[in-house]
Amino acid sequence: MSKPIVGIFTNIEMDKNYLFPGYPRITINQDYSRSIEEAGGVPILIPTSQYFENLERQISMCDGLLFSGGQDLNPILYNEQPCDKLGDLSPMRDSFEFMAYEIANKLQKSIFGICRGSQLTNVFHGGSLYQDNSFQGTDLKHMNYANPDMPVHDIIINEDSFLFKATGKSKISINSFHHQAIKNLAPGFKISASAPDGIIEAIEKEDDSQFIAAVQWHPEMMSRTNEDSQKIFKYFIDKLKK
């Protein structure tokens, strides 16, 4: 079989430090595409756009989709009003990715979400979020500004999860760069892993009709130096070959 194609959804940001401050740019960390390529996949970038009519053709070209990290989701999407600890929003990206997710479901594409992508997955399927981790009552450090590939805390992995199948371990150490987390789990999903403080760190679809899984941390930033992280991408790519 030829290498699976993975569509990676990108961020849209206003230029702060380049030639034209305030100019919109499509951005994404190189680690996403590198991790997919090293796992045996072919990455293509899907830019956030106002041209929703192109989405079905873009998604049809892909064997799987990766929803990447980025801004907070608008809490209106899960029927809450914004609180004062809410971070930056991207209404265009919210709309674009919700439409993309709907099309991906219709086409039964495999989906892997990272950070914002995990929160998007949960909200799209009917779950909700803590708008800030402090509302969950934790004092564990989930927003760490040290080296991006440095482990910060452990997670406990459920043995009936995709993470256990990928790594063969019931506990691994991860990095962490999120101030929000899953609150109410979406119907039809199960918890794959949790932090010691109870915050949900990974989820997956309960049945096997469509592979959908997501993690709250950033394994793409660890995958260059951390075998467990790269095994997660390898597992995703191997699912696309079946």
Image (spheres, rainbow, N blue to C red):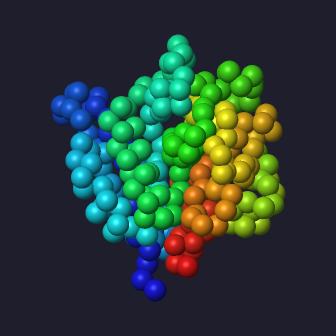
Residue 230 shown left or right of residue 169 in the figure: left
Examine the rendered structure and indicate whether residue 96 appears above or below residue 204: above
Residue 17 shown left or right of residue 164 in the figure: left
Residue 51 shown left or right of residue 101 in the figure: left
Examine the rendered structure and indicate whether residue 53 appears above or below residue 198: below
Residue under the point 43% across and 78% down: 3
- In this view of the protein, can residue 82 be seen by the observer? yes
> Residue 191 placed where, x, y %?
72, 49
> Residue 239 placed where, x, y %?
57, 72
Residue farthest toward the left in the current orientation of the protein: 20
Residue under the point 38% across and 51% down: 100
Question: Which quarter of the image is occupied by the C terminus?
Answer: bottom right
- In this view of the protein, can residue 144 be seen by the observer? no
Dividing the picture into quadrants, the one containing residue 94 is: top left
- Number of labels in the image equals 0
Q: Front-most of 222 and 113?
A: 113
Q: Front-most of 43 and 91?
A: 91
Residue farthest toward the top in the current orientation of the protein: 84
Examine the rendered structure and indicate whether residue 151 appears above or below residue 79: below
Examine the rendered structure and indicate whether residue 160 appears above or below residue 27: below
Residue under the point 30% across and 55% down: 55
> Residue 230 placed where, x, y %?
60, 63
Q: Front-most of 215 and 169?
A: 215
Residue under the point 67% across and 41% down: 185
> Residue 16 placed where, x, y %?
29, 29
